[in-house]
Image (cartoon, grey):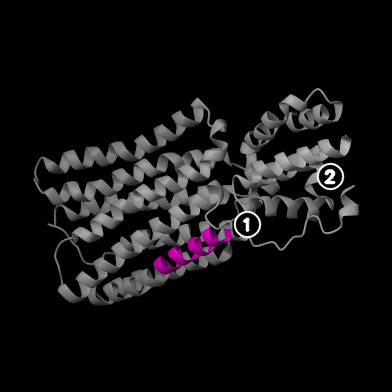
């Protein structure tokens, strides 16, 4: 039992990072919108870059070979697309003061989800036979548990607001709910194993993104949108940090081992 | 003949792990060496070690990896040592 609990022990650095982000965002929010925008932008860049760099290094270790190699290439593409989306948003926010989400941001953000789904597919593929009907039902129920409130909220608000942008905002929580399905499967498939940390933390990251997206959906509609930074960005930042630590945990497990298994042939006889 | 079967089991085990990626094979080999001071070929005589390492890494899904090895080895199961290897992995 103790061993199992130790495996789920969250690294202290992760706690600290989450607390630092929380303090930074709340303090900046206290000093006003400009401070909040600056702080959030400054925090987003290194975290998003880390989310691209770490899986890319990990994919290089696999040299793109094997199902896990393909999975990490997909993750790198997903993270790159989200970084592009993030940079596009910040560029428009800082230089153009745009009052809507740019098309390129939405395009790359939505396309990123497809690659995240592919990542899950390739990672889980070698053990797909272990997926039971019960697991599928649980994963489906969890996904629906996230999807249905989003659909309900969109419908509810669309009665009074006929904004196309409302639907646009509702797409993200829906995509989150879809990628939650393989993430929950991952948690159940690898539960107790060393690789399970990635899936537990990824599910938590998706959950945070759903909460943030749905809260944005609720808070945005009555006020005719707040496209600039919002304290809710803290949830996105936490979600990014969780993903970064998830990737890092995999890098630690499958680190480069210089092993010469058959150095002494006599030993093998 | 026994050596040939040991080699066969080794190659098939490595093949299954390599299908996931070289670092996965490296990690399994490293853990076998670190925990039991043995190599993959030694698992022919001590399959429980391979089972422990796979379970430690992949949790309950390790049985699918075991199943893949088992599937390839099935036609050689008439041999007592291979049968024993498969039985321990299955248990």
Q: Quadrant of residue A220?
A: bottom left
For the C terminus of chain B, the image quarter is top right
Give left or right: position of B40 versus A265. Answer: left
Q: Quadrant of residue A149?
A: top left
Q: Which residues are magenta?
A: A47-61
x and y percent of residue A251 in the render?
Answer: 58, 60
Reading the image, the residue beneath label 1 is A254
Image: A35 above or below B20: below
Give the CA distance from mark 1 to mark 2: 22 Å
Give left or right: position of A127 versus A78. Answer: right
x and y percent of residue A185 in the render?
Answer: 49, 38
Circle 1/circle 2 CB separation < 8 Å: no
Q: Is residue A54 magenta?
A: yes
Identify which residue, B71 or A188, lies in the foreground: B71
Reading the image, the residue beneath label 2 is B42
Residue depicted at x 14% and y 65%: A99
Residue depicted at x 54% and y 49%: A68
Dot 1: what SS?
loop
**Is any atom of residue A184 visible in this view?**
yes
Residue depicted at x 57% and y 64%: A12
Nearer the viewer's eye, disc 1 or disc 2?
Answer: 2
Q: Main secondary structure of the magenta part?
A: helix
Dot 2: what SS?
helix
Identify which residue, A33 or B10, lies in the foreground: B10
Identify which residue, A124 or A47, lies in the foreground: A124
x and y percent of residue A148 in the render?
Answer: 29, 36
Using a 10 Å C-alpha cutoff, classify the residue at mark 2 as few (fewer than 14 neighbours), some (14 to 19) or many (20 or more): many
Identify which residue, A112 or A266, lies in the foreground: A266
x and y percent of residue A152 in the render?
Answer: 23, 37
For the N terminus of chain B, the image quarter is top right
């Amino acid at each position: 039992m103790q061993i199992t609990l130790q495996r789920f022990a969250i690294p202290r650095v992760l706690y600290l990072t989450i607390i630092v982000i929380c303090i930074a965002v709340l303090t900046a929010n206290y000093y006003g919108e400009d401070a909040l925008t600056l702080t959030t932008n400054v925090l987003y860049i290194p975290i998003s870059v880390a989310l691209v760099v770490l899986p890319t290094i990990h994919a290089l270790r696999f040299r793109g070979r094997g199902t896990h190699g393909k999975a990490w290439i997909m993750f790198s593409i997903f993270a790159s697309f989200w970084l592009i989306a993030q940079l596009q948003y910040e560029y428009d926010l800082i230089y153009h003061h745009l009052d809507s989400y740019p098309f390129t941001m939405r395009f790359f953000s939505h396309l990123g989800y497809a690659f995240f789904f592919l990542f899950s597919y390739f990672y889980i593929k070698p053990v797909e036979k272990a997926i039971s009907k019960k697991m599928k039902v649980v994963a489906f129920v969890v996904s629906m548990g996230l999807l249905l409130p989003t659909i309900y909220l969109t419908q509810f608000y669309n009665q009074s607001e006929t904004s196309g942008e409302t639907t646009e905002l509702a797409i993200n929580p829906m995509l989150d709910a879809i990628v939650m399905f393989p993430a929950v499967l991952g948690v159940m498939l690898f539960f107790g194993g060393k690789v399970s940390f990635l899936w537990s933390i990824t599910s938590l990251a998706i959950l945070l993104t759903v909460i943030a997206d749905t809260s944005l959906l609720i808070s945005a509609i009555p006020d005719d949108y707040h496209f600039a930074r919002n304290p809710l960005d803290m949830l996105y930042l936490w979600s990014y940090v969780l993903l970064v630590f998830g990737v890092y945990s995999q890098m630690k497990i499958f680190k480069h081992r210089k092993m010469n298994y058959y150095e002494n042939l006599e030993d093998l006889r | 003949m026994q050596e040939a079967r040991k080699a066969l089991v080794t190659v098939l085990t490595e093949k299954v792990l390599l299908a996931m990626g070289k670092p996965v094979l490296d990690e399994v080999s490293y853990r076998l060496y670190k925990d039991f001071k043995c190599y993959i070929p030694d698992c022919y005589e001590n399959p429980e070690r391979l089972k422990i390492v796979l379970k430690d890494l992949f949790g309950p899904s390790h049985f699918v990896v075991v199943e893949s090895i088992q599937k390839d080895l099935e036609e050689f199961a008439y041999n007592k040592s291979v049968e024993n290897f498969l039985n321990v992995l299955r248990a």
